[in-house]
Image (cartoon, rainbow, N blue to C red):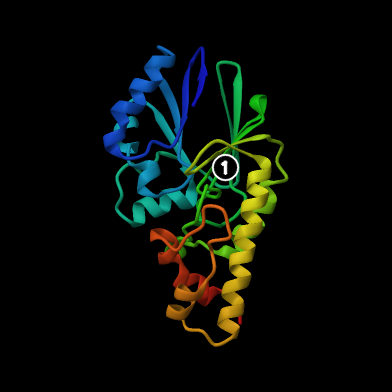
Amino acid sequence: MLTTDEGVILIDDKFERNVPEILEKVRAITPRPVRYMINTHHHGDHIGGNARLMESAEIIAHTNARANLVRNSMPGATRLAFNDAFELYLGGKRIQARHLGFGHANGDVVILFPQHRLLHTGDLFVRGTPFIDYASGGSSETWMKTLDRILELEFDTVIPGHGSISRREDIVRWKADFETVRRRVRELKRAGKSREEVARELKLDDLAGWSMTGLFAKSLPGLYDELAP
């Protein structure tokens, strides 16, 4: 959240049921209204409040994220969308939204707060295991390149899509762990292991926060298919 004398800018809005709590927290900090909200991507835990918030605020997303909302008949498709980058100026403050490539999905954006050297990554960086949404253009290969582009930006502090406030070096370590997982999957595949065998044998317990749980387990068949033997 960025507060200004002219209103508030939010990043993502969780689920619809969370909107009253979000607005209550905003009011605890400032009496100014929410003027803009930026979606980092199209998944329901990040855009679920769109339909309610767009009654009074303008919501912005990447073109692909908006297209995914429409394609999946999800509520709250934004009225505004952009391709590569845009800047938003409000109350003497500025933020930059950048689409640096596919990764978690095909419409991921990061939000840079230059005055604070702060970056919101959406789910392009999380504290723990990632979800690669192959059905929406996600790819581990392009994700690694996108992370390299993210690390070219000027920031110190990081707000991840899930997890605690982090630092630039946390992204560096997480990317290294991600590359380790990619290498291990490729090696198991090269050894003739099936998807099911990889799911059982893939070593993750030496990587901070990584585990064979929910969304990562759902991503593993696609990761197996993506990686060349």
Q: Residue furthest bottom?
A: 192
Query: Residue at left 31%, top 31%?
Result: 19
Amino acid type shown at disc 1? Val
- Front one among 168 and 108: 168
Q: Is residue 55 visible?
A: no
- Front one among 175 and 49: 175
- Residue 155 lies left or right of residue 203; in this view the side is right
**Tag 1 secondary structure:** strand
Q: Residues within 10 Å of mark 1 (few under 14, many from 20)?
A: many
Q: Position of residue 184 (x, y in %)?
A: 60, 72
Q: Is residue 21 visible?
A: yes
Query: Residue at left 39%, top 50%?
Result: 43
Residue 48, located in which quarter of the rendered image?
top left
Query: Residue at left 63%, top 65%?
Result: 180
Q: Position of residue 75 (x, y in %)?
A: 29, 45
Q: Position of residue 169 (x, y in %)?
A: 68, 44
Residue, disc 1? 110
Residue 190, located in which quarter of the rendered image?
bottom right
- Residue 45 lies left or right of residue 112; in this view the side is left
Query: Residue at left 48%, top 49%?
Result: 63
